[in-house]
Image (cartoon, coloured by chain):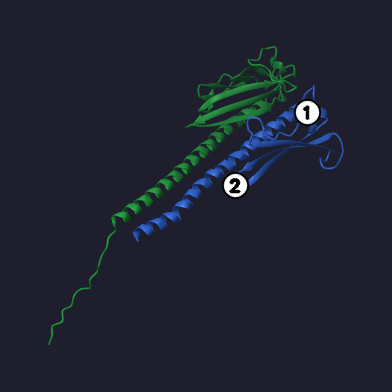
Amino acid sequence: MSAVTVHPPVRTRRGFTLMEAVACMAVLSAMGSVVSTLLYRASETFRVTSTAAQLHAQAAAALDPVERLLRSMPARPDGQAPHLTSITAQRIAWTDADGGALVWRSGSQLMLGFGGQASTPILSDVTAFTVQPFDEDNQPIATPVSALNLPLVRRVRLSVTVSRQGVSETLSTKVFLRAMGREVGP
Amino acid sequence: METIAVLVVLAVFVPPALLAVRDSAVRSVSATLVSRARWLATEKLEDIIADRHSTTRGYAYVDESSYPDEPAVADSPQFSRSVSVVETGADLLSAGAGYKRIAVTVSWNDPIRGLQSIVIETAVTDQP
């Protein structure tokens, strides 16, 4: 009787050759570089566009009430013109029954103040704010507007630029000063 | 085998992730473009209403010829703006005189939706 010897199955296990490993690493690093570039570009685009959208929304939220206040500005007691009290390139002020209001830039903030009360910031990260008045014929009036020319102002263009993280957004609006509110007595 | 599995997983999940990021960015741009267009249209309407109330211009000045098309709006060249003025009767629908329907159209090219536009309308009368 012959003895039977059972051997475990021989399994030849072969690893990567050096060339295969190098080729694999090269492919992976190339793909990684492409993917990381795409990811960076996508995230950068997202950051820029979302920041711009955020800045636009904030500028719009700040200018919206200013626009309404300017539209409801009353006439002078003589009823001939809006009751503006001063306009410079970066500041506009007017009088109304509640003591008036003014909008101006202070440093990097756009401020809104109501007669005698402390002004409050309505927009931050402001890098530019300009006020451009126009007359009845839509011709620009030079700033600062003299007392003589103030009654000529009928339209005002406000332009604000806000910047954050290297992204800038400019929002402009033009308002017709209706001067239809109740007159303010002397 | 493991390498192939990793590559397959990357190939399946990375492109949609990138597209999602890009898509959300573009959509936020779309909303901002609509808002900008609204501001541009309102700005033009204010000018037209001011012209109507101007003592030197008045009702007669409010006409399409006074407001030529702007293929590229100043300061916002990606937008175009046009004004239409139609004189009507008191119902603002039938032909007539004494009333003008004004429509300001602002158009732009949206990266997703293509050519877009908004229209804001108002009416003026020849009554003081």
Label 2 element class: loop
- The residue most toward the bottom is A1
- The percent position of residue A152, horizontal first and vertical second, equals 72, 17
Crowding near the residue tagged with mark 2, few <14, some 14–19, many ≥20 C-alpha atoms within 10 Å:
few
- Against B19, residue B119 (above or below) is above
Task: Please tell me the colour of chain A.
Answer: green
Chain identity of mark 1? B
Indicate left or right for B107 with A90 as reference: right
Tell me which numbered mark, 1 or 2, is placed earlier along the sequence.
1
Query: Looking at numbered disc 2 in the image, what kind of residue is underneath it?
Result: Ile
Indicate left or right for B54 with A36 as reference: right
Q: Kindly identify which numbered label has been placed on residue B79.
A: none
Crowding near the residue tagged with mark 1, few <14, some 14–19, many ≥20 C-alpha atoms within 10 Å:
many
Q: In the image, what residue occupies the spot 57% across and 24% down?
A: A129
Residue where numbered disc 2 is placed:
B112
Residue where numbered disc 1 is placed:
B52
